[in-house]
Every structure is written in structure tokens, then in C-alpha cells.
Image (spheres, helix red, strand yellow):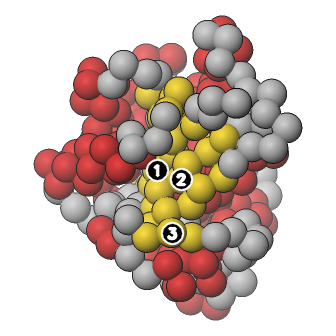
Amino acid sequence: MNKKYIGVFDSGIGGLTVVRNLIAQLPNENIVFLADTKNMPYGSRRRKQIVEFALNDVAILNRYDLKAILIACNTADSAARKILQKQSDIPVLGVIEAAARKACTVSRNKKIGVMATAATTRSKEYEIVIHSFDESVEVYSLACPELAVMIEKGKDGNDPEMNAILTEYTDILKLKGVDTIILGCTHYDVLKEKVEELLPETAVISSSACAIEDLNELLQKQDLLSDDPDPEKIYLVTADPQGFKKTASAILNNINIGMV
Ligand code: DGL
């Protein structure tokens, strides 16, 4: 069978939380995943550099026979989605639109908080996309610059330092009266339970989960869904395969990791 892959990329293990959802919902798909660990974190970079990284990530993924690209990184989505869509002849999907749409349907008081990297927050992409769905929504964006790096080092919601930082962030959003929070960085998926515990009255939406529904719909529409009984999963990193494997094991077990 001629395998066609879904290409997925992120700066690091955040993208694996997207792959985990992808495998759960579309188990027959062939996937090639790239974590640009050499250049992680994207969130503290300038836009121009994030665009360069994203273009390079897609060039690496394009060594495989792809049928769609999923930008499993809010930061790269906010900086480079339009450019990638323009230069690609296959569908390119991000995570922001799906998370924003979900938040708009879930929020009752139309006050939505967004926790994201500094670059995503600066881009105002969540505000723009949320307002394209509903202009009356108040959006409170909060840059959480240290979280992705801590998560990449293997820390989760049980870590005391993480707990203290998250408590500060969630207190700020609580004061704003938001009833819905978007975890607008795919790394933060590992913090979902902790944020829900800290804000029991608030709906917590992970950007890692939302995009798969859109991808499914797109593949169905274009008749691209795979029924491969033995789909292939390829995991690539640009640096530190051992370290990545260790942290990744909290998200996906027994994966082989290659270097590019
Ligand atoms: N996981 C990425 C995101 O969704 C970015 C983490 C980083 O490299 O700063 O924004």
C-alpha cells in the first residue's frame, strides 16, 4: 500500500499530546511527527525566527509522502500558518482556530482566558480568531513564558514550583471573571487536570484536543481517511533523542525516536 502520512510538528513534547489525540481518534492514520527540540522554546523567539523554524520543520516533514500537515504548536500556528498554507499544495491545519471555536461555544458569560507562550500572546492571534467567531467575547490573554520549558524538562502539575506558578496565573484569570480558559500551548495539555483543580468552576479547553475533529472532517471531505490496518508512526527530533524519549514516555509509551 502506498502510505500517505499526516505530518505533525511542534518545538517539543507539546506536539505529542496532539499526536496522542490523533492516534486515539484516527487510529488508522500513518503519522510522521517532528519535534524541533534543537530550537525549543519557540515561545520566546521573534516572529521571523519562528517562521524560519516552521518552514524548516515542514521541509523535513516533506521528505515523506504527506497528505496533510498539522501544526501542533500554537506559537508556530500564530506566526506561520498563513505562510505555510500559501506555499503548500496539501491542507495545512493549525490548533488555534479549533480551540477558539470550541471556547466560543462553551463560554456562557463570553469571557475567555487564554494561557499561551509570549510569542502567541504578542501575536494576538487568539483575539483575532475568537472575534471572527464572536465579536462580543472579552479575551484575556496571559503569557506564561516559563511553563513550556518546565514541561519539556518533565515537570507536570504535581511539581510544587509548577503548582505555585499556576496558582498565580489562574488567580489572575479568576479575577477577570472568565468562565472558560484555553490552554493555548500544546505543552500545557499536561497541566489540564491541575488547572481544572485550581479553577473548578471554569471550563478548561486544551488546544491539543480540538484540532483533531477539524482534521477528521477535512480528511473525510477530501476522501483522504486511511483504513491502513498497520499504520506507521515515525517520531523525529532535531536534538537530544534520549532526553526527549524520557520525557515523552509520560505521554506516549515505547516510541522509537530518530534524529534529523
Ligand atoms: N508547544 C508550543 C505551543 O503550542 C510552544 C512551546 C515553545 O516552544 O515555546 O505554543
Question: Left or right of 170: which side holds 146?
Answer: left
Q: Is residue 53 above or below residue 213?
A: below
Residue under the image location 56 percent in, 61 percent down: 235
> Identity of the amino acid at label 2?
Phe
Residue to which mark 1 is pinned? 9
Residue 245 disc label: none
Residue to which mark 3 is pinned? 258
Q: Earlier in the sequence, mark 1 or mark 3?
A: 1
Quarter placement of the C terminus: bottom left
Q: Please say whether residue 146 is visible from this viewpoint.
A: no
Q: Position of residue 109 (x, y in %)?
A: 65, 31
Q: Nearer the viewer, mark 2 or mark 1?
A: 2
Q: Position of residue 38 (x, y in %)?
A: 33, 72
Q: Residues within 10 Å of mark 1 (few under 14, many from 20)?
A: many
Residue 33 disc label: 2
Question: Left or right of 63: which side holds 31?
Answer: right
> Identity of the amino acid at label 3?
Gly
Determine contact: label 2, label 1, CB under 8 Å.
yes
Viewer-nearest residue: 129 or 50: 50
Q: Is residue 95 above or below residue 119?
A: above
Residue under the image location 51 percent in, 17 percent down: 134
3D distance between C-alphas at marks 1 and 3: 14 Å
Determine contact: label 1, label 3, CB under 8 Å.
no
